[in-house]
């Protein structure tokens, strides 16, 4: 009888380990152990000195990783729309997100900084954060909606390409005589 109970216990333990392995594998493949990120979009609007027709709208996009997993940000897509007439506002695009900065010694032994464009994105390790800033010129009387999408990839054998989206509205400022 003891051998039968011992054998049954052994097979139940093997089955429990197998089910635990399947559970962990499905969580890994589904990307649930590579948690997402927090994204925020903020706008700041200021009058352009000497220009009565236009304002500056500063756009700040903040991406903060959770304490699990690492991602590589490839691109940020920003669309701005004038809510008075529905027209799109041109957003200046950066060709590359990363500029590699290195220092080298010149002939006189002084350090010189050099910059090279990189094809890689911005890597965010767990718990890290980064921000990106853009500047638009908009009509002074126009409310503007800004939609931002961050395109990234996870490091490791994860399925899918994560995206984060955020929006913000910039309302016209009150005219002040100051």
Image: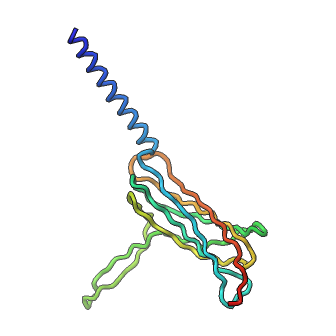
Q: Where is residue 63 shown, x and y percent of the image?
A: 49, 62
Residue 2 falls in image quadrant: top left
Asked whether 69 or 117 is in front, the reply is: 69
In this orientation, which residue lies closer to the viewer: 103 or 177? 177
Residue 84: x percent and y percent? 78, 69
115 horizontally vs 13: left or right: right
In the displayed structure, 112 sits above or below 3; it is below
Q: Is residue 170 above or below residue 32?
A: below
In the shown orientation, is residue 121 left or right of residue 107? right
Q: Residue at x 27, y 19 (%)?
A: 9
Residue 19, horizontal then vertical, whole percent: 37, 29
Q: Residue furthest top?
A: 1
The number of numbered badges drawn on the structure is 0
**Way the structure is coloured:** rainbow
Residue furthest right as drawn: 85
Residue located 40% across and 62% down the image: 128
Q: Quadrant of the N terminus?
A: top left
**Height in image: 157 above or below 128?**
above
Residue furthest left in the image: 2
Q: Quadrant of residue 118?
A: bottom left
Q: Position of residue 120 (x, y in %)?
A: 43, 64
Split into 4 quadrants, where in the image is the C terminus? Answer: bottom right
37 relative position to 138: left or right = left
Q: Residue at x 70, y 78 (%)?
A: 173
């Amino acid at each position: 009888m003891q051998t039968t109970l011992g054998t049954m216990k052994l097979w139940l333990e093997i089955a429990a380990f197998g089910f635990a392995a399947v559970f962990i594998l499905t969580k890994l493949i589904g990307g649930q152990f590579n948690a997402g990120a927090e994204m925020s979009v903020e706008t700041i609007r200021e009058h352009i000195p000497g220009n009565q027709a236009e304002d500056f709208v500063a756009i700040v996009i903040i991406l903060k990783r959770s304490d699990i997993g690492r991602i590589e940000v490839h691109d940020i897509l920003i669309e701005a729309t004038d809510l008075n007439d529905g027209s799109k506002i041109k957003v200046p695009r950066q060709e590359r997100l990363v500029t590699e900065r290195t220092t080298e010694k010149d002939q006189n032994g002084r350090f010189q900084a050099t910059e090279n464009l990189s094809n890689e994105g911005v890597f965010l390790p767990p718990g890290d954060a980064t921000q990106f800033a853009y500047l638009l010129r908009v009509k002074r009387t126009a409310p503007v909606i800004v939609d931002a999408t961050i395109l990234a990839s996870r490091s490791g054998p994860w399925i899918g390409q994560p995206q984060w989206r955020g929006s913000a509205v910039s309302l016209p400022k009150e005219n002040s005589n100051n």
